[in-house]
Image (cartoon, grey):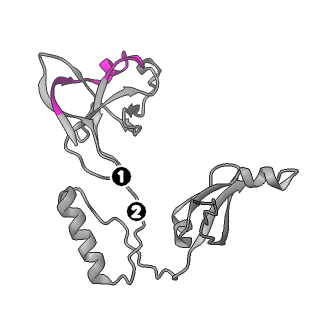
Amino acid sequence: MNTEKVTARRLTTEEVSELNLQDSIFVSAEMDGIPLDCYAPAFLAKPGKNFEGGSFTARTIFGKEIHILPDNTEERGIWVSDEAGEEIEVLQSAGVLLNLALFVPNGNKESLESLYTAAREAFGVGIVQRWNEEVIPVPDVKVDLYEEPTRGRKNTSSQIRDRRALDIYPTRVRFMEPSDGWRFILEPHKDVIDDTPTI
């Protein structure tokens, strides 16, 4: 995470109700229950003048929608840049959350622990975390995984041209969703043989 110090002040409900959608604000950077002790740049989801009680809705630049009561002392509130204010830590950029399915040949607990340890050494102990661990035996077989349109074509050759090759491991389907209007097709794997004549 990259953060920077910003001088800002906390707004009251009356001040927030005067903001427009273009006004830059700062709100809590907490994401999906992950406590981050900093703020994120944001904008109101609808003009403050439309506030009718309840909470204000702000959308951070990271796509997270947050509901806030500015005067609630238990919440971090809504802040704006102000040289007469106090310093707050603002999140400028964050990493990418990867959802990985790892295939480990002849995998056992020791080899998985080795992988985990190596990843933590490479990226940092606080960065790499196991959120959901599921060990699945993978058959020693390869398939060709394609996507093809759900509506059939009039001639089969155009339908084959519309196919998209995705993978060759069958268990990967459990972690994927087909694109809208497409479906998965599994076929026995065929190695590509280059029969181009050579001299």
Which residue is rendered at x = 37% and y = 26% of the image?
Answer: 43
> Callout 2, which amino acid?
Leu
Q: Is residue 9 magenta?
A: yes
Distance CA(mark 1)–CA(mark 2): 9 Å
- Residue tagged 2: 100
Which marked residue is nearer to the observer: mark 1 or mark 2? 2
- Residue tagged 1: 97
> Callout 1, which amino acid?
Leu
- Residue 89, compared with residue 25, is above or below; it is below
The total number of labels drawn is 2
Does residue 41 appear in the picture of this structure?
A: yes
Q: Quadrant of residue 1?
A: top left
- Residue 123, compared with residue 85, is above or below; it is below
Badge 1 marks a residue whose secondary structure is loop
Dot 1: within a 10 Å radius of its alpha carbon, few (fewer than 14), some, or many (20 or more) residues? few
Report the residue that reaches farthest toward the front: 199
Q: Is residue 107 magenta?
A: no
Cβ–Cβ below 8 Å for labels 1 and 2?
no
- Residue 164, compared with residue 65, is above or below; it is below
Q: Where in the figure is residue 183, as x and y percent of width and height? A: 69, 58
Report the residue that reaches farthest toward the right: 154
Which residue is rendered at x = 62% and y = 51% of the image?
Answer: 179
Does residue 150 appear in the picture of this structure?
A: no
- Residue 23, compared with residue 173, is above or below; it is above
Q: Where in the figure is residue 165, as x and y percent of width and height? A: 61, 57
Q: Which residues are magenta?
A: 4-24
Left or right: 157 in relation to 187: right
